[in-house]
């Protein structure tokens, strides 16, 4: 298989299905693009031709199965790395997929390869943030006893964390709102639904009458539990980076 | 007294207990609220940089004991409060539902006697597990001297149990905690260990203990030897070290303005890590002549420098347990090395690209026969100087220990 390098910029809708559609065409035409970007983010230049791709589910499935034939692990890394928001992740993952086909099953053992290092790092950043949010996410209890939380993650981790919350709060009704991406995940104590949250009027949500009491208790607890003689703000920031503070009750506004 | 005031008093008294881990429990949610998370989850970090995972409270700070190091000793004039079992349960549920916490850590001062106190704690936990159908994490501090029957009942409901050994040696204990006899600490530990062996669901996340560091003259060697005994004989999951925060003026104790021995505590945690994950034994790290850790160099480096004849180690050949003995190489790095070298001969550049921290490791390894500098510099003094330079830079940046690790906060 000989691939030729081109100056093309390929655009897609930002979904994994769209991305795999592009991969399908790359493997079909044997032409490697200069860049793969989300439709809205494309910047044209004099030398490149921009080609927009519409998502084709059949093509997505073909690629998905192809990667899976190498190993489930490869597919896992591709999926998880794709949730990362790093610019140019599309090309990084593409190069990794090339190496997957080249080295087959043993690829993920090859921790010294540039492509593996890059994709494993993307994956690690995503799973780290997902793990952190399992702890840092805060629910407020609304008047109808539904739990509501807002998050603004760097990476698209909503799909990764909901499994955890579904198990933990299986008998509850809850909503997790990714404000960065304008998506809300709803759980009605049976099923999970994703919805567009751009019309959600957050200010109009009404809390339960107990909510303020427990919020105050938690804030007091948080202040009290620190041992003054051992104050270490650097360490606190290392484990709980500032960007998470605005959505956490106890650190909001500080 | 309202809940807010009670919580202030009873959380304040509990904060000196360092255990925050919520790992090791695989408890499932059975149509109720909550579950265990094997790796544990930190829900917040307080201003002292410690992880907040569990709601850490005392049932009461009323106590019939008069342990000199303790803020709640009988003779201290502090404000006293007590939660009812129902209050504990409701507080836990309401914090847990809002995802503030991973579970409950319940301890207590001793009211009336050990069994009475433990009975009250049991009531709270029983309520949580039955009335509230709560399946989240619970860590309970056993009251020394309580009956085996209560330990049996409790062990079936909680995920973790701990009894604090408090002071590292029997003479210290006799001097500062005359009411606690060591039998009352070691015997129940033994009993719990045996029960765990018999029944996987009994205290499924294992038992832990805590020692206070710096309140007495005990050496690091004494302290670490006790820890080793705990790990070897009692299958203890974790020994915690708590740098003594002077709360009481007493001629037997450090002065009230003595700084908390944070660096010593940090060195002990590092050494403890070596015992648990790196297959080191206390006698390799310290001896009665060399009874305390060097504060300038971490325990593993220190050991390596005293055993330079075992170095440098060839990265491409050494087995896993030998790789783990290299300063700066941790479990994850060792695994990466083993995995990658099946397919290539590793160079220094490879290791760097693989994000393996070379600051310390470089002085103790060869990559395909190459050393990082002229081999004539492979000398204790040269390496020590280079390392202490790095170490001082490190200390400036933080004093981080335990908390998050990449393979779970405990296991």
Image (cartoon, coloured by chain):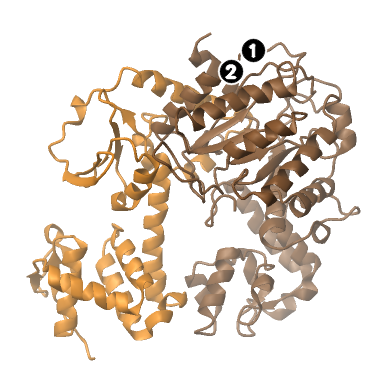
Chain colours: A orange, B brown
Q: Count numbered badges in the picture.
A: 2
On-image quarter of the C terminus of chain A: top left
**Helix, strand, or loop for circle 2?**
helix
The answer to whether B31 appears left or right of B384 in the picture is left
Q: Residue at x 51, y 20 (%)?
A: B86
- Please tell me if label 1 and label 2 are on a single chain: yes
The answer to whether B136 appears left or right of A119 in the picture is right
On-image quarter of the N terminus of chain A: bottom left
Q: Is residue A215 above or below residue B97?
A: above
The chain that hosts pointer 2 is B
The answer to whether A139 appears left or right of A26 in the picture is right
Q: Is residue B249 above or below residue A15?
A: above
The reply to whether the C-beta atoms of the residues labelled 1 and 2 are less than 8 Å apart is yes
Q: In the picture, residue A204 is in which quadrant?
A: top left
The chain that hosts pointer 1 is B
The residue that disc 2 covers is B9
Crowding at mark 1 (Cα within 10 Å: few <14, some 14-19, many 20+): few
Closer to us: B146 or B55: B146
In the orientation shown, which residue stands out farthest toward the top?
A: B1
The alpha-carbon separation of the residues under discs 1 and 2 comes to 7 Å
Closer to us: B291 or B168: B168
Q: Which label was assigned to residue B383?
A: none
Q: Position of residue B213 (x, y in %)?
A: 76, 38
């Amino acid at each position: 298989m000989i691939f030729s390098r081109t100056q093309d910029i390929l655009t897609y809708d930002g979904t994994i299905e769209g991305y795999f559609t592009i991969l399908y065409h790359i493997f079909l035409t044997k032409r490697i693009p200069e860049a793969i970007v989300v439709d809205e983010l494309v910047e044209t230049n004099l030398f490149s031709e921009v080609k927009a791709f519409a998502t084709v589910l059949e093509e997505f499935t073909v690629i998905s199965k192809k990667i899976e034939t190498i190993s489930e692990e490869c597919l896992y890394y591709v999926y998880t790395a794709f949730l990362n928001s790093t610019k140019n992740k599309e090309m990084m993952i593409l190069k990794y997929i090339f190496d997957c086909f080249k080295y087959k099953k043993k690829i993920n053992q090859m921790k010294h390869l540039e492509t593996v290092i890059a994709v494993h790092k993307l994956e690690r950043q995503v799973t780290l943030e997902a793990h952190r949010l399992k702890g840092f996410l805060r629910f407020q209890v609304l008047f109808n006893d539904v739990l509501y939380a807002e998050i603004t993650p760097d990476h698209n981790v909503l799909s990764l964390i909901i499994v955890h919350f579904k198990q933990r709060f299986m008998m509850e009704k809850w909503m997790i709102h990714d404000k960065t991406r304008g998506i809300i995940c709803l759980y009605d104590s049976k099923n999970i639904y994703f919805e567009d949250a751009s019309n959600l009027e957050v200010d109009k949500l009404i809390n339960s009458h107990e909510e303020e009491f427990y919020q105050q208790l938690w804030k007091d607890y948080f202040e009290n539990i620190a041992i003054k003689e051992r104050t270490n703000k650097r360490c606190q920031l290392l484990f709980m980076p500032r960007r998470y503070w605005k959505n956490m009750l106890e650190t909001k506004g500080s | 007294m309202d809940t807010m005031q009670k919580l202030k008093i009873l959380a304040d008294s509990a904060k000196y207990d360092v255990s925050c881990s919520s790992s090791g429990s695989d408890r499932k949610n059975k149509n109720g609220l909550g579950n265990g998370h094997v790796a544990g989850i930190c829900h917040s970090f307080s201003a002292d940089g410690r992880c907040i995972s569990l709601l850490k409270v005392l049932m009461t700070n009323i106590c019939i004991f008069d342990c000199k190091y303790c803020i709640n000793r009988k003779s201290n004039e502090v404000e006293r409060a007590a939660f009812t079992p129902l209050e504990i349960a409701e507080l836990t549920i309401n914090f847990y539902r809002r995802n503030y916490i991973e579970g409950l850590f319940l301890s207590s001062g001793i009211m009336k006697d050990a069994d009475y106190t433990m009975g009250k704690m049991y009531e709270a936990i029983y309520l949580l597990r039955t009335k509230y159908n709560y399946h989240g994490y619970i860590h309970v501090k056993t009251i020394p001297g309580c009956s085996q029957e209560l330990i049996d009942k409790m062990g079936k409901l909680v995920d973790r149990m701990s009894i604090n050994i408090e002071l590292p040696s029997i003479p210290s204990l006799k001097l500062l905690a005359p009411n606690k006899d060591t039998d009352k600490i070691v015997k129940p530990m033994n009993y719990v260990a045996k029960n765990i062996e018999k029944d996987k669901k009994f205290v499924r996340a294992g038992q832990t203990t805590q020692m206070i560091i710096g309140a007495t003259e005990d050496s690091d060697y004494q302290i670490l030897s006790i820890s080793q005994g705990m790990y070897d004989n009692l299958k203890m999951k974790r020994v915690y070290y708590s740098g003594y925060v002077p709360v009481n003026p007493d001629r037997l104790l450090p002065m009230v303005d003595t700084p908390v021995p944070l660096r010593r505590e940090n060195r002990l945690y590092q050494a403890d890590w070596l015992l648990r994950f790196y297959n080191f034994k206390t006698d390799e790290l310290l001896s009665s002549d060399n009874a305390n850790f060097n504060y300038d160099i971490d325990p593993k480096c220190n050991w390596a420098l005293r055993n330079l004849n075992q170095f440098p180690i060839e990265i491409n050949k050494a087995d896993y347990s030998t790789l783990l003995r290299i300063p700066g190489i941790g479990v994850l790095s060792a695994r990466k090395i083993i995995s990658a070298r099946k397919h290539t001969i590793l160079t220094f550049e490879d290791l760097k690209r693989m994000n393996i921290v070379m600051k310390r490791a470089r002085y103790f390894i060869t990559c395909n026969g190459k050393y990082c500098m002229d081999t004539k510099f492979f000398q204790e003094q040269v390496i020590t100087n280079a390392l202490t330079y790095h170490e001082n830079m490190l200390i400036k940046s933080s004093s981080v220990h335990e908390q998050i690790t990449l393979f779970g906060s405990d296991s």
